[in-house]
Image (cartoon, grey):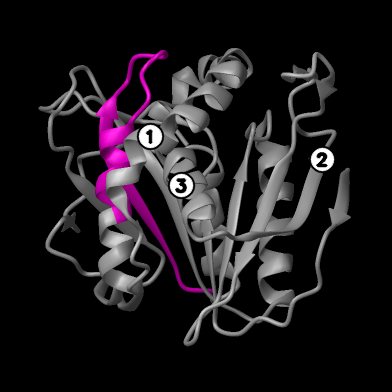
Amino acid sequence: MFRIKEFAKPKLKNVVVVEGLPGIGSVGKIAVDFMIESLDAEKLLEICSDGFPNSVFVNEENLVDMPKVELFYKKFKHEDFIFVTGDVQPVDERACYEFCNLILDIFEKYGGKEIVTLGGIGLPKILKIPKVYCSGNDKSIIKRYAHKKMNRKIFGTVGPIIGVTGLLVGLAGERDIPAIIVLAQTFSHPAYLGVSGAKEILSIFNDKFGLKMSLGKLGKEIKDIEKEIRLRRQVNARYEKKNAGYLGKEVSEGATYIG
């Protein structure tokens, strides 16, 4: 089901896997793509699959690209990172389970330490300063990621967390792998990109890991990321529409979430 192209065979230690695939506001994808760009991460793997949408993208050279997920890595003194980004999410439940288990196999191959998944909480309005929430499969990892900008009281704020962002954390728990979900509020309109929410998440990562990313560059670099996302928005919108029945329940702020 998966076609994997390997670009490097690095020796990594204390690996933190950070996932950000298309979802509400593309918050997770924006944040992960910015980290890859800012930290000069190198490509590790490229994954294509029969479980991805049955379509192709036309690139700037007027040639077609298959939908794919890419993994990048970056080595640091105390821990290393693997970033998971891509054009699409798996198209259905079975494909999502199989894809998440593949990512967990890769995690174990490289001696992973923990997993962080990123996404958005959809709201019916635009917020100047979005709130960030977290959940996880173990109380200890939530405690380790405690931050003044992170709200741990997420119960009642979201319904089911659909897609790789949620399922990867759940399946990680079955393998006794610590994993945390970090979600930023964003406007749920299909054409809206959650740059503000992504910036709040990136700020937390800067503090947690001392990454020293210049968030002032986000506005400039986001133009390239935005162009790529908009080119692929039609395919991703099909995924969101298909899963519309699984959106998080309405609460006082009108919050919903999809993976």
Question: How many numbered badges does the structure rendering display?
Answer: 3
Of tags 1 and 2, the one toward the viewer is: 1
For residue 100, above or below residue 13: above
Q: Is residue 256 left or right of residue 131?
A: right
Q: In the image, what residue type sits under mark 3?
A: Phe
Q: In the image, what residue type sits under mark 1?
A: Lys
Q: In the image, what residue type sits under mark 2?
A: Cys
Residue 167: x and y, percent? 54, 49
Query: Which residues make up the magenta segment?
Result: 177-202
- Residue 220 marker: 1
Residue 183: x and y, percent? 32, 46
Circle 2 — which element? strand
Q: Is residue 179 left or right of residue 131?
A: right
Of tags 1 and 3, the one toward the viewer is: 1
Name the residue at 21% across, 39% down: 157
- Identify the residue position indicated by label 2 in the image: 48
Q: Earlier in the sequence, mark 2 or mark 3?
A: 3
Residue 232: x and y, percent? 61, 20
- Identify the residue position indicated by label 3 in the image: 34
**CA gap, disc 2 and disc 3:** 22 Å
Q: Nearer the viewer, residue 230 or 248?
A: 230
* Residue 217 lies in the magenta-colored region: no
